[in-house]
């Protein structure tokens, strides 16, 4: 019995220490006669053990080592196995799902008609071979002209021409690699003859069929190929030459006169073609490229063939698209077509940024030699309110070494960004959506969110921990949405649109609350917010050579912060302490919000005026994407009411709070029982109704038209469900809150070091194992985002001084520097048609 009581006392002490709650009065009844408290103790001890040994500092060290090892691995892999992405495209790949082909290590662009015509303008393409090559010919010209149909002409030459683009594509019937084919090739190599810019050949099935699959026919095939390979090499000096390896057959459904065409025979002929063509290598490489990827694709789909010999149309389309990527990617350089692309040379700004970061490293070395090592990292404030946790001791001001340390760390991180998405070091793959790739990770993160739950410091509506939690889980959902390609599924797309609106709602809520309560409209506050929002994006614009609008969310929240500031700062400045003296001032705030609403509606229904305003240089440099502000117009219009909804909600809440209408004590429901139950029921119904509506939408355009007007209902429903019950306001997920504090960095960093090809694909650090690759790349990505948030804080303390005169001087210097960068970038832009 004494031993039992001693255990209970130990549990009491541990339980109180870890949970922050008083221990149970009757230990024997509550603990020793039940497992609930022991479960809580084990749960809390487990969390503490994890937090103690796995700190963010240790995680960053592990991620740094992982990056270095991965760099060595990929460099060695490319050195020993070859790093030519054209070879990857043409030689191997796999299916994602049933009909999406994924080349090994690179992304294949899906060419549209206008793109294909632009690439092949004034070019001549020739397909030479049997009926299988004829099929490939038709699939190829269908990319150029989707209306073109197969004409059913057999054993004859076929021609296609697009006079508007001077494109000529021919199919020449040469079913065997023999003297007839050789003569045709020789005619092209003669002086003055019109040579094809792209030549695609392939033949074997007729040789097998006509000679019954004899070994003599195979030997003759080798001799004939050896005789023509010299002509192919000559033609390859002028253009591109591809030899298509034979696709498998479905032997069970072959007709009687084709039964001799077996997969074993085809494999022998493929081996002969590979041996002959590889023997013609010059300087270790043949100019004639072997196309084996379409054969690999056919292995999985030949069972769908009608006659066992000719491929299904979807597989033929894969082969044609592979050829189109091989020919056109290096010409058009599509961002989501990384196969067969050469590296762009760094521009002037990228070179200058590299020198700048290297200069910071040199300064650090000088400081180290001089022995100046004083540096203290400040606690980062939140962007929305700029509130800080006050340290127990007085903070030591940052020394002269601090900004250079931050810049040096930023330089290393930017080097990683460049290697991931601008250098040909790591691999890239395209996205492919399935319900499991979106919903299973979603379940995992919400289980983790529940596991890491803690008591809130306060029980107010939308308290700090809760808003961080909200931003955190929304950001994680958005990340999963992006990497899984879930935008293809309209119901998920619409729910994520609500999350983006909720971010802007929080922007309106947070900034309005700050200005209303504190009345700080000083330049220092404005510059702090603008710096923290824009620092990372501005650096990426230079390092990654992307326009500002490319990172659309930052221009959006920056624009709305300026609008909120202007609305609240303009005369008359109405604050809570002003309104307390007279309730009339509340109508003044409502008048301001009404004016803002009219401003929004005016621009929303005047697209021409909107475009003219934002097309004026240099403002246009902030909002244009690919020479147009259409993307900015779309993003702005889609969530145009979210910010004002947040401001209005903040105003109503703060007024009700001041009048003590709400019950915000721990464990207390926000309203009376009847009102609380009614609002909870209404919120749940609105959630269900919205989901049904989103699932019934047929197109994104149709849904987006309604989104600005109804997204606020979902946002308010969530707030009420999350805050009406007292117990719900008293707890929060520390897991989600941690991510919420770096949500902006996560959103921006994903563009280049988690996704790839400017969000069009997925970064591949570990090839061949998608699950492990996601785990490793996510771990590094999160560590980088957290470090950038600290770097931003370090630099903000130095770049934005509290002294007004010093701040004005720096703003002037930064304005001049920005103007110089704009002029340099403008001068460096290629002229149209260049």
Image (cartoon, helix red, strand yellow):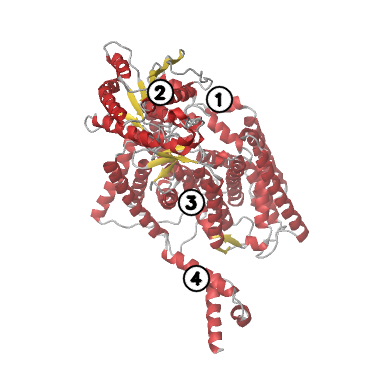
Residue position for label 4: 45
Taking depth in this image into account, of 310 and 60 the one nearest to the observer is 310
Residue 450: numbered disc: none
Residue 742: numbered disc: 3
Q: Quadrant of the C terminus?
A: top left
What percent of the width, then of the height, locates residue 436? 54, 48
Q: Residues within 10 Å of mark 2 (few under 14, many from 20)?
A: many
Q: Residue at x 37, y 44 (%)?
A: 414
Which residue is outermost to the top?
192
Q: Secondary structure at mark 2?
A: loop
Residue position for label 1: 612
Per the model, the C-alpha gap separating discs 1 and 2 is 57 Å
Per the model, the C-alpha gap separating discs 4 and 3 is 26 Å
Q: Is residue 476 above or below residue 605?
A: below
Marks 4 and 3: which is nearer the front? 4
Q: Secondary structure at mark 3?
A: loop
Q: Are marks 3 and 2 in contact (CB under 8 Å)?
A: no
Per the model, the C-alpha gap separating discs 4 and 1 is 61 Å
Q: Quadrant of the N terminus?
A: bottom right
Taking depth in this image into account, of 709 and 516 the one nearest to the observer is 709
Q: Earlier in the sequence, mark 1 or mark 2?
A: 2
Q: Is residue 721 above or below residue 94?
A: below
Marks 1 and 3: which is nearer the front? 3
Q: Secondary structure at mark 1?
A: helix
Q: Is residue 265 above or below residue 415?
A: above
């Amino acid at each position: 019995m004494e031993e039992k009581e001693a255990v209970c006392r130990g549990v009491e002490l541990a339980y109180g220490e870890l949970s922050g709650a008083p221990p149970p009065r009757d230990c024997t009844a509550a603990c020793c006669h039940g497992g609930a408290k022991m479960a809580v103790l084990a749960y809390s001890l487990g969390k503490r053990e994890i937090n103690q040994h796995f700190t963010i500092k240790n995680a960053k060290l592990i991620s740094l080592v992982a990056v270095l090892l991965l760099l060595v691995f990929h460099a060695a892999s490319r050195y020993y196995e070859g790093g030519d992405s054209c070879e990857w495209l043409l030689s191997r790949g796999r299916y994602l799902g049933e009909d999406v082909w994924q080349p090994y290590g690179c992304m294949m662009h899906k060419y549209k008609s206008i793109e294909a015509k632009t690439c092949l303008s004034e070019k001549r393409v020739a397909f030479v071979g049997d009926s299988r090559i004829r099929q490939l010919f038709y699939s190829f010209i269908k990319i150029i002209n989707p209306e073109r149909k197969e004409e059913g002409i057999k054993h004859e030459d076929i021609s296609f021409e697009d006079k508007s683009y001077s494109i000529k594509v021919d199919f020449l019937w040469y079913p065997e690699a023999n003297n007839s084919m050789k003569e045709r090739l020789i005619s092209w190599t003669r002086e003055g003859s019109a040579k094809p810019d792209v030549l695609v050949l392939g033949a074997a099935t007729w040789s097998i069929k006509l000679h019954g699959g004899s070994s003599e026919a195979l030997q003759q095939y080798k001799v004939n190929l050896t005789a023509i390979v010299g002509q192919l090499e000559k033609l390859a000096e002028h253009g591109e030459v591809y030899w298509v390896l034979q696709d498998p057959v479905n032997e069970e459904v072959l007709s009687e006169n084709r039964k001799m065409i077996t997969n074993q025979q085809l494999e022998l002929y493929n081996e002969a073609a590979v041996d002959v063509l590889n023997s013609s290598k010059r300087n270790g490489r043949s100019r004639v490229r072997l196309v084996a990827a379409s054969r690999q694709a056919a292995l999985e789909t030949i069972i769908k063939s009608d006659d066992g010999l000719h491929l299904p149309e979807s597989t033929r389309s894969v082969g044609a698209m592979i050829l189109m990527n091989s020919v056109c990617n290096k010409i058009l350089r599509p961002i989501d077509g990384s196969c067969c692309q050469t590296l762009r040379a760094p521009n002037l700004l990228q070179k200058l940024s590299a020198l700048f970061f290297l200069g910071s490293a040199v300064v650090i070395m000088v400081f180290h030699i001089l022995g100046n090592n004083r540096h203290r990292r400040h606690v980062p404030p939140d962007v929305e309110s700029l509130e800080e946790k006050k340290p127990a001791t007085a903070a030591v001001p940052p020394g002269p070494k601090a900004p250079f340390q931050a810049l040096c760390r930023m330089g290393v991180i930017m080097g990683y960004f460049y290697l991931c998405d601008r250098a040909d070091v790591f691999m890239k793959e395209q996205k492919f959506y399935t319900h499991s790739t979106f919903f299973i990770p979603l379940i995992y993160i919400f289980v983790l969110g529940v596991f890491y739950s803690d008591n809130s410091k306060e029980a107010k509506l939308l308290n700090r921990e809760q808003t961080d939690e909200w931003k955190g889980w929304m950001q994680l959902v958005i990340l999963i949405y992006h990497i899984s390609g879930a935008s293809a599924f309209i119901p998920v797309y619409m729910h994520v649109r609500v999350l983006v609106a909720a971010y802007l709602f929080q922007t309106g809520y947070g900034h309005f609350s700050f200005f209303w309560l504190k009345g700080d409209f000083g330049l220092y506050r404005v510059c702090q917010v603008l710096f923290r929002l824009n620092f990372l994006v501005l650096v990426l614009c230079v390092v990654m050579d992307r326009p500002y609008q490319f990172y659309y969310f930052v221009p959006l929240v920056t624009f709305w912060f300026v609008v909120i500031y202007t609305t609240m700062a303009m005369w008359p400045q109405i604050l809570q302490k002003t309104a307390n003296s007279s309730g009339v001032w509340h109508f003044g705030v409502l008048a301001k919000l009404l004016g803002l609403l009219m401003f929004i509606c005016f621009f929303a229904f005047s697209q021409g005026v909107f475009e003219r305003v934002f097309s004026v240089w240099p403002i246009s440099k902030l909002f244009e994407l690919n020479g147009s502000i259409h993307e900015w117009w779309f993003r702005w219009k889609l969530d145009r009411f979210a910010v004002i909804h947040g401001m209005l909600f903040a105003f109503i809440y703060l007024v009700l709070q001041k009048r003590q209408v709400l019950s915000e004590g721990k464990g207390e429901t926000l309203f009376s029982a009847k009102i609380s139950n009614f609002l909870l029921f209404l919120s749940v119904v609105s959630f269900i109704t919205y989901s049904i509506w989103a699932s019934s939408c047929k197109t994104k355009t149709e849904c987006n038209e309604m989104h600005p007007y109804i997204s606020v209902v979902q946002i308010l429903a969530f707030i009420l469900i999350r805050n009406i019950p007292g117990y719900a306001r008293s707890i929060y997920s520390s897991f989600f809150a941690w991510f919420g504090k770096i949500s902006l960095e996560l959103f921006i960093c994903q563009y280049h070091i988690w996704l790839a090809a400017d969000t069009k694909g997925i970064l591949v650090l570990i090839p061949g194992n998608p699950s492990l690759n996601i785990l490793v790349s996510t771990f590094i990505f999160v560590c980088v985002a957290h470090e950038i948030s600290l770097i931003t804080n370090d630099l903000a303390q130095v770049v934005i001084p509290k002294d007004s005169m010093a701040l004005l001087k720096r703003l002037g210097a930064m304005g001049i520097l920005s103007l110089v960068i704009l002029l340099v970038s403008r001068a460096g832009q290629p002229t149209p048609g260049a």
